Amino acid sequence: MSAFIQYTLQGLAAGGFYALSALGLAVIFGVLGVVNFSHGACYMLGAVISAVLLAELGIGFWAALVVVPIVMFGFGVLMERLFVRWLLALDPLYNFLLTFGLTLIIVEAVKQRYGVSGLPYEIPAGLGGQVTVGSVNLSVYAIFACVFSVVVCLAVGLLMTRTRIGMIVRASTENADRTRAFGINVTRWVTPVFGFGIALAGLAGVLAAPTRAITAEMGSNFIIILFAVVVIGGLGSILGAVVAGFLVGLVEAYGVAYAPAYAQIVIFVLMAAVILVRPSGLFGREEVA
Amino acid sequence: MRSRTNTGVSAVAIAATASLALAACGGAGGPQASSSGGLTDDKIVIGLLNDQSGVYKDLSGPNSKVAIELAIADYKAKHGDKAVAKNIEVVATDHQNKADVANSKAQEMYDRQKADIILDVPNSAAALAVATQAKNKKKLYINIGAGTTALTGASCNKYTFHWAYNTAVLARGTAGTITKEGGKKWNIVYPDYAFGQDMNKSFTAEIEKAGGTVGQSIASPFPSDNFATFITKAGEGDPDVVGSMHAGGDLINFVKQFNQSPLKGQVELAVGLMFITDIHSLGVDQFAGTQFTDAWYWNFDEQNKKWADRFTEKTNTRPSFAHAANYSAAMNYLEAVQEAGTDDADAVVAKLEGKKINDVFLRNGEIRKGDHAVTHDVYLAKVKSSAPEEWDYEEIVKTIPAAEGYGEANPACNLG
């Protein structure tokens, strides 16, 4: 039984992390309708920038939690201004292919500059070690990452549903013309929202740095799981991304524990099952077109 | 909104299809007539075929070309006007860690670029593909980067040599030694592909031979970045040692997460295959105390250090064992050409077979006639707890004599 509790806790810890990572993807899709394939690369950039900040400027983990999202916000704004916006009016597939291409460029550029075998990063002081309750234990850092992720997810959820900014952003996506008629400059909001989504990917990267291998390829496999998360949760749904993040974390942990060889397949079986029963995902809106 | 959602879903499907298609896409190159014969084209071409851009780039990659160029310089300096090969060229090609790409690139190197020899080829599947080409074209091939024992076993051939290490050597060195020293109860986690499965088998056999037991062998998907639950499972049953058979990014993920688990300090961590570049990327303190088998270490003695300094001057980084082995293989190939007075593959093979070598890479080395494994002393290394200087990460605990590390010639090999 204690083993089961242990697996559950590990699943939840991983789930919180998946939730945060998928959140930016959900926000960008929900508002712009862009399936951002470069999310994994931006996640990787977040981790790489943290490592570089530490190695070259001595900027540690706590500062990186603030600095990196700001840098990535700027990066996202540039991406949107220079590339993404020109394709918004076209089929979403165009932006998908664009971000796929950008991913290849970003990954290769990082490989050229920092090599392929990865960058070192330490666990920040105070977050090392384990918490043990009875026979169950969990690393302090895993708990921190999970709680931090949930707090950020909640904050973003509140921002989108309870504030005026959130209201404008949502209205702009629901019906841009009608929102304009109310005297709101819709296009003004598109750029910051994209930047915000990219900043969230960067934030997830900072959180990953102390516990994952920081390599140019770290996002390539990860993005596939993130797509599974947002598809299960419902593309564009923030609540969906969070719930599905935890669901996938748990399913993966139980898979590893009881059928290790199938651990990753289970996630995609779950995805297939969800799509069969609810094509728009668990929390996707099924509106009448 | 609905239509957008649906488009998004289909976009995901397209992405998956696209990436599969990309992964399956390999270069094509048709077979061409081969040519051979003694310095006919008045030129020796050494083909370096390895990973120039992916996960194995740092541990061998483009810097192996530098190592080979050092060998060429040394050969020329040694023989001067008497050198049989006056004009020597190195061509480097990326095999992208794909067997089909390696296969067609090897053909291209032998046929179009007139390579007399292909060197390196990490990644076992790619390595075996090139061995088949070497056999068909009757041209030399010295593998360095790959671990599979099949190169000197079922897939061995007259023109293929295996220079630096193999999975059986790693198992004898690491599993054998640690088990004999008291680490009797093992749990193993291995990545679920050819290399990982091979390592798991070799390690299990050696542990049992040394009087130990393997409680669990757990397969992990490849690649993977969340090992927390695998590590918990590996800690069950109160083992003395947890063995990780991962390589590259997977290994770094595993070790980082192992260090954050309660097993750290309670259970010994043994690593199947590790390169100095792995330690460099994760930081020496993360690996501190980890034991593994190394084929060569740059700071082992003065001779190694002197060569490493030359290498560092050109690359700004310290050499891995693969770099040193590429140097050694190129040098000994050129020496064999010198002795044979020709670059005819059969004549060069005859000079190489059975040769006993002591050089900067090989100590008590011998090119075994029976299976073309190049046997030499290997080392049980322990990662230092702090680095006295950058790249000085390893303490050599024990020299494993060639005979002990390599055992007998592989009976599965028939050189024909």
Image: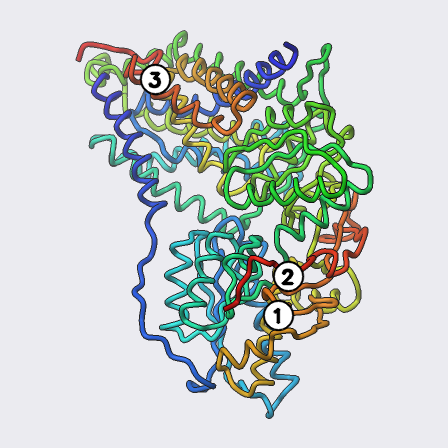
Residue B326 relative to residue A273: left or right: right
Which residue: 54% across, 46% down?
A: B195
Q: Position of residue A274 (x, y in %)?
A: 34, 16
Asked if residue B146 is positioned above or below residue B265 in the image, the reply reads: below
Q: Position of residue A71 (x, y in %)?
A: 50, 34
Name the kind of residue labelled 2 in the image.
Ala
Q: Quadrant of residue A192?
A: top left
Lower sequence index among marks 1 and 2: 1
* Residue, disc 1: B369
Q: What is the chain identity of the residue bearing mark 2?
A: B
Q: Position of residue B135 (x, y in %)?
A: 44, 67
* Residue, disc 3: A273
Classify mark 3: helix, strand or loop: helix
Asked if residue B398 is positioned above or below residue A1 in the image, the reply reads: below
Classify mark 1: helix, strand or loop: loop
Q: What is the chain identity of the residue bearing mark 1?
A: B
Name the kind of residue labelled 3 in the image.
Ala
Mark 1 and mark 2 residues within 8 Å of each other at the beta carbon: yes
Q: What is the chain identity of the residue bearing mark 3?
A: A
Foreground: disc 3 or disc 1: 1
Residue B339 relative to residue B138: left or right: right
* Residue, disc 2: B409
Q: Quadrant of residue A213?
A: top right
Mark 2, Cα crowd under 10 Å, few <14 / some 14-19 / many 20+, is some
As drawn, the residue found furthest toward the top would be: A162
Mark 1, Cα crowd under 10 Å, few <14 / some 14-19 / many 20+, is some
Quadrant in which the C terminus of chain A is drawn: top left
Q: Position of residue B285 (x, y in %)?
A: 74, 40
Which residue: 71% across, 34% down?
A: B213
Asked if residue B32 is positioned above or below residue B174 in the image, the reply reads: below
